[in-house]
Image: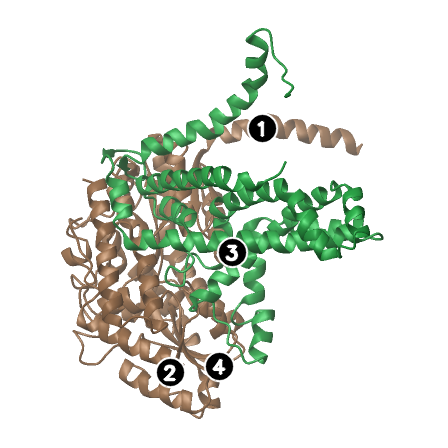
Amino acid sequence: MRKPTFVALLAAGTTLSPLAAYAETEVQFWHAFTGRLGELVKAQVEEFNSSQSDYVVVESHKGNYSETLNAGIAAFRAGEQPHILMVFEVGTATMMSAEGATKPVYEVMAESGATFDPDAYIGSVKGYYTTTDGEMLSLPFNSSTPVLWVNRDAFEAAGVDPDTDLSTWQKVGETLDALKAGGEECPLVTAWQSWIHLENFSAYHDVPFASQDNGFAGLDTELMLNGPAQVAHLTAMGEWAQDGKFVYTGRRNEGGANFRSGECALFTESSAGYAGIKAEAQFDFDVRPLPYWEGVGNSPQNTIIGGASLWVLEGHEAAEYKGVGEFLAFLSSSDVQAQWHQDTGYLPITAEAGEATRAAGFYEENPGTDIAVIQMTAKEPTANSKGLRLGSFDQIRGIIDEELEAIWAGDKSAQEAMDSAKSRGDALLRRFESANK
Amino acid sequence: MEKRVTFRGWLLPLLLIAPQVFISAVFFFYPAGQAIWQSLFIPDPFGLSSQFVGLGNFEFLLGDPFYRASFLTTAIFSILVTLCSMIPALFLAVIADRLIKGSGVYRTLLIWPYAVAPAVAGVLWLFMFNTRVGVISWYLGTLGYDWNHVLNGGEAMGLVVVASAWGRISYNFLFFFAALQAVPRSVIEAAAIDGARFWRRFFTIVLPLLSPTTFFLLVVNVVYAFFETFGVIHTITAGGPQQSTTILVYKVFSDGFVGQDLGSSSAQSVILLVVVGLLTIIQFKFIEKRVHY
């Protein structure tokens, strides 16, 4: 009896499924998330797929941020591009210059008729992905901003009050001395050094990172990261590195392992480090706003984002773009965003999602999780703190990493290193400019 | 008098070399030609437009002191990898050759590392030398040595050399071992009767007889160090700290596949092609003269 039923089911399945697939339009979505974040993305996609029957979004993981961007570019060259591609913020200028390869989000939304209100998005998040005329080119997906993580147990062990004021680098400097004197081997560690200690540093102190409004106003931009504010900060960091008060662990987020294991007292890292720290830390921790140098620039201005946005690629059918529009509208909806923000520590991309999170009492239960939101939104962004839009930025970050390593190792002064980073980075910017004329 | 086989017609010889020519054309001449062609342009990543710049890419590269410095880094890296993979392999092969019992097991175990992909080998070594949780760096710490390859360029170089050479030792071992087995016993026995000790016999008889194998391995290992090691470097140091482990092929990879600068990346691969071509010519012209077949 069992066998015929199975065969019948199989037959029914094979005859029915092509019909089902015919009715649904497929939308390909390539992203860069693995682990917990990968699961959360998968859950979002499944929720969208089961909420309607016209479109099926197919998500695939294509490696890390750089690899995903490359996979998208290679696929475009071969005519096999997905509908939606996740691109990290560093690749924004590359995507913006690729007219003819990308379909601006505002256009997709207008054509699809999906609900879309550009004003619902948080200004400092949206600004990164919007033209100077206010047209949104890609949809902000996961955005975070750097904050200061504190290991309270390590403070206690070194005999330092964990509630001490850490709002300025001046105060942090004194605290590092006290921690070191109290026997702490790793007072300060960082992740993403260029992003936090140069890019965000510049925005936070309202000093330019690059000319032409950090590249927003044109491709003929030059780096200005060798200014006095940046050099003073890196000089202090370099001295701390020499004295063993700042421990360098690598160019990416290697320092996270040192902090989560309880080895380090202070950690400058993205607000999205929250999920990992909460899951692994066996100590009492809290989160503070990123410190600033009192009296330097207009500090504290606002910090800028890191993370990724979703780009829609050209070369598909109108019906498929309608599905893309529906999916993007679903992702921006308040419930989905609030959940995403609470699960990951990424910023809510709409003001409404932030308010929903506050109303649900999440910030009271998880103190400090709103610091990133406040830090980003407390002040209206200036030309120096809107974001960065530089070509070949992945390579320029590599150059900055190399030069920073020279400071930490004591091989170069901060001024020498940043002058060199500027001249090397400018050469790449000129190449990018001539490639995208 | 040399023996030569001659073909009567043209068809058969052409047919016989056709597969080889076909493979070379598809996997070498076509891509190499593409690289040369693309090195004359600055294209945008998506292939939507591209701008002819003549030799501009080469000018840009050779005018960059950091690029010129990576030639020296590559030379140091390649010499070290070649030495570190050939000398231990020869030593192990000599020992294995003397074994009477259990040489099969010994041989098999020595070949294993060759099965490990370079990127995986990189991760393994990185894990052992991890500045925080690495077994070896921990032992070094107890001895009072503070291992830190994320800031110390010399240590980073040492680590990528060891990780690159490790898997290669197996490959070299196989060739040396086979060559040692082919050394006629009678010659060695005659020398032994004349009173030559083991190492004396090794340096005056065995080593010269191994020279064709040694030469072959030299060429192959240099090519390996130049082209196939970017996986190890990518996983361990990503070229850093500063630029201490940025070898030419790693820069080709990172500029092309991370930075999407295909023009510069193509120009670099053309330069690399010329460098390795020249090296191979030098090897064949000067070193091969000392090889006895």
Front tag of 3 and 2: 3
Answer with left or right where residue B117 lies relative to residue A161: right
Q: Are marks 4 and 3 in contact (CB under 8 Å)?
A: no
Residue B148 at x, y = what percent? 48, 71
Answer with left or right where residue A44 lies relative to residue B270: right
Q: Are marks 3 and 1 on the same chain?
A: no
Number of residues whose C-alpha sits closer than 10 Å to that of mark 3, classed few (under 14), some (14–19) or many (20 or more) = many
Q: Residue at x 26, y 61 (%)?
A: A421
The chain letter under disc 4 is A
**Mark 2 to mark 4: distance in Å?**
26 Å
- The quarter of the picture where residue B162 lies is bottom right
Residue A53 at x, y = what percent? 46, 38
The amino acid type of the residue labelled 2 equals Asp
**Mark 3 to mark 1: distance in Å?**
63 Å
* Residue A349 in view, yes or no: no
- The quarter of the picture where residue A334 lies is bottom left
Q: Are marks 2 and 1 on the same chain?
A: yes
